[in-house]
């Protein structure tokens, strides 16, 4: 193979790699995944014990999108809106957890996802306080708002045992790096 043929083949190969990298980046951009991210959520939580209590939490998250389809994140939050049930103040004091995300990467600006992990919650009801951990799961959707900015809506079941169930619907914003 002559030098001009080698240069031609190398140019074609380099152009192909560049175009496929750009296409992959464009796909990742369109589906809202790729790299590190951070975000904040406000969650309308329902604590179902003997009576229902509706509280609000503010949380932050940091994560990494390992592939187009799988990621890992950590979340931590605290209660910002308490409820009173039968004269007793009920609040979710704080929570934190680690989660795996399963994303349905696609060509649109909307990316559905599922969340699986463990959450530790600390609840207060009157003068009683308790903290417990449990398997958590949920589903949501990220909606791309700008190149590195997306909004999300999600449902999570944070805690569930025979006496208490904690779930919530969250609204948030996420920045991708």
Image (cartoon, grey):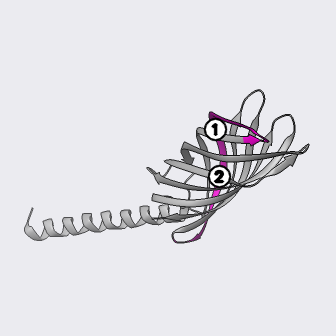
Residue 86 in percent (x, y) is at 91, 43
Residue 118: image quadrant is top right
* Near-viewer residue (128 or 105): 128
Residue 60, placed above or below residue 120: below
Provide the residue span drawn in magenta: 124-147
**Disc 1 to disc 2, how far (Cα)?**
17 Å
The residue labelled by disc 2 is 78
Whether residue 70 is visible:
no
Secondary structure beneath dot 1 equals strand
Q: Is residue 148 magenta?
A: no
The residue labelled by disc 1 is 136
Whether residue 85 is visible:
yes
Residue drawn at (45%, 50%) of the image: 67
Q: Is residue 144 magenta?
A: yes
Residue 73 in percent (x, y) is at 51, 49
Residue drawn at (56%, 43%) of the image: 97
**Which quadrant: the C terminus?**
bottom left
């Amino acid at each position: 193979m002559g030098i001009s043929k080698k240069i031609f083949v190398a140019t074609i190969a380099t152009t192909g790699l560049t175009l496929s990298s750009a296409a992959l980046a464009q796909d990742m951009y369109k589906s809202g995944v790729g790299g590190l991210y951070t975000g904040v959520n406000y969650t309308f939580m329902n604590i179902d014990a003997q009576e229902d209590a509706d509280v609000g939490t503010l949380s932050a998250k940091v994560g990494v999108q390992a592939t187009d389809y799988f990621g890992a994140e950590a979340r931590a939050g605290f209660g910002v809106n308490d409820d009173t049930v039968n004269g007793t103040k009920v609040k979710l004091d704080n929570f934190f957890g680690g989660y795996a995300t399963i994303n349905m990467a696609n060509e649109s600006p909307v990316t559905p996802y599922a969340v699986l992990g463990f959450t530790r919650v600390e609840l207060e009801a009157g003068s009683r306080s308790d903290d417990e951990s449990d398997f958590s799961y949920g589903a949501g959707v990220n909606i791309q708002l700008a190149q590195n900015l997306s909004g999300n809506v999600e449902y999570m079941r944070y805690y569930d045992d025979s006496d208490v169930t904690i779930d919530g619907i969250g609204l948030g914003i996420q920045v991708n790096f």
